[in-house]
Amino acid sequence: MTEQSALLLRKQLAVNTHTFLHLGELNKNPVEGFSAGLIDDDDIYKWEVVIIGPQDTLFEGGFFKAYLTFPYDYPLRPPKMKFITEIWHPNVAKNGEVCISILHEPGEDKFGYEKPEERWLPIHTVETIMISVISMLADPNSDSPANVDAAKEWREDPNGEFKRKVARCVRKSQEMAFD
């Protein structure tokens, strides 16, 4: 499976003239709001993404860096995604790990919260993952949080403490992006 997964990932990736690589498929049909490429040219399984905070959200103007780590049996299993840039969000654990349905292992949810079709399917690509993460930033799911404190603030006072913490993360991400 390793050769097949590497081939699928290479298909999604095309070398750009810059040192940062961009997705070949996305160059044909670009999706606004993110950039993606390999962390190390010799490892097709470790990607870096930068998500630009979606317009008209509290995250607008932010530059949030994350790593996508693909398993060797991709696409049968989902990658793991972890923000490197600090981000305050109900669906992002305090250590940066992203918790959304399409990144959960395929099959039945032992807690009965998610339907199998909401979880990882082999048809998902870097593009569909990024679209889901951008959507997650715009519309947090506080019913199934990875960060309980952020979820509580989001539910009880989204324009108070939650908004202040997100604004601080956006400012820090902007400072880091231009260092």
Image: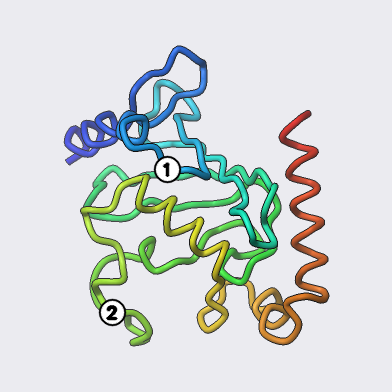
Residue at 63% of width from left, 46% of height from top? 64
Q: Which residue is mark 1?
A: 31
Residue 48 picture location, percent across and down: 51, 37
Q: Nearer the viewer, residue 161 or 119?
A: 161
Residue at 42% of width from left, 28% of height from top? 22
Q: Are marks 1 and 2 in contact (CB under 8 Å)?
A: no
Residue at 24% of width from left, 72% of height from top? 117
| Left or right, 150 with reference to 97 | right
Which residue in the rendered view is the most extreme toward the top?
A: 17
Judging from the image, what secondary structure is the residue with disc 1 in? loop
| Left or right, 73 with reference to 92 | left
Judging from the image, what secondary structure is the residue with disc 2 in? loop
Q: Earlier in the sequence, mark 1 or mark 2?
A: 1
Q: Nearer the viewer, residue 118 or 68?
A: 118
Residue at 25% of width from left, 33% of height from top? 6
Give the numbered dot on residue 115. 2
